């Protein structure tokens, strides 16, 4: 029985003038777990799910700067795949 590959990567994304580190871990064919932190060090965890052919953040209890950067995060995932 073949084991599934463990795919994880880190990407630097510029959000609102600040370079932030985003960590991703693939969880199946259409789901990534992601996390990043803000300037105070608070860590935010979120899920990215593929809807059609684009990636969307599936969590809602996140800061606005993170929700507004959904397109940039999706582009980073697409670049990795």
Image (spheres, rainbow, N blue to C red):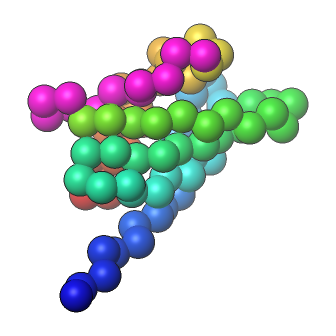
Q: Is residue 2 above or below residue 46?
A: below
Residue at (61% x, 37% y) in the render: 45
Q: Nearer the viewer, residue 18 or 37?
A: 37
| Residue 50 located within the stretch drawn in magenta | no
72 relative to 64 in the view: left or right: left
Q: Nearer the viewer, residue 51 or 36?
A: 51
Residue at (24% x, 85% y) in the render: 2
2 relative to 16 in the view: left or right: left
Residue farthest to the front? 1
**Magenta-highlighted residues:** 51-61
Q: Is residue 34 above or below residue 63?
A: below
Where's the N terminus, which quadrant? bottom left
Residue at (46% x, 64% y) in the render: 8
Residue 6 in percent (x, y) is at: 41, 72
Residue farthest to the top? 64
| Residue 59 located within the stretch drawn in magenta | yes
Q: Quadrant of residue 43?
A: top right
60 relative to 74 in the view: left or right: right
* Number of disc labels: 0
Instruction: Tell me if residue 12 can be seen.
Output: no
Residue farthest to the right? 40
Residue 41 in percent (x, y) is at: 84, 37
Residue at (23% x, 53% y) in the render: 29
Where's the C terminus, which quadrant? bottom left
Residue farthest to the bottom? 1
Q: Quadrant of residue 66?
A: top right
Instruction: Tell me if residue 47 can be seen.
Output: yes
């Amino acid at each position: 029985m073949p084991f599934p590959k463990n795919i994880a990567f880190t990407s630097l994304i510029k959000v609102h003038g600040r370079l932030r580190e985003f960590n991703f871990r693939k969880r199946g064919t259409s789901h990534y777990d992601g996390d990043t932190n803000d300037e105070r060090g608070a860590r935010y965890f979120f899920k990215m799910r593929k809807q059609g052919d684009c990636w969307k953040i599936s969590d809602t209890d996140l800061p606005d700067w993170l929700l507004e950067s959904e397109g940039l995060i999706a582009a980073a995932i697409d670049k990795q795949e």
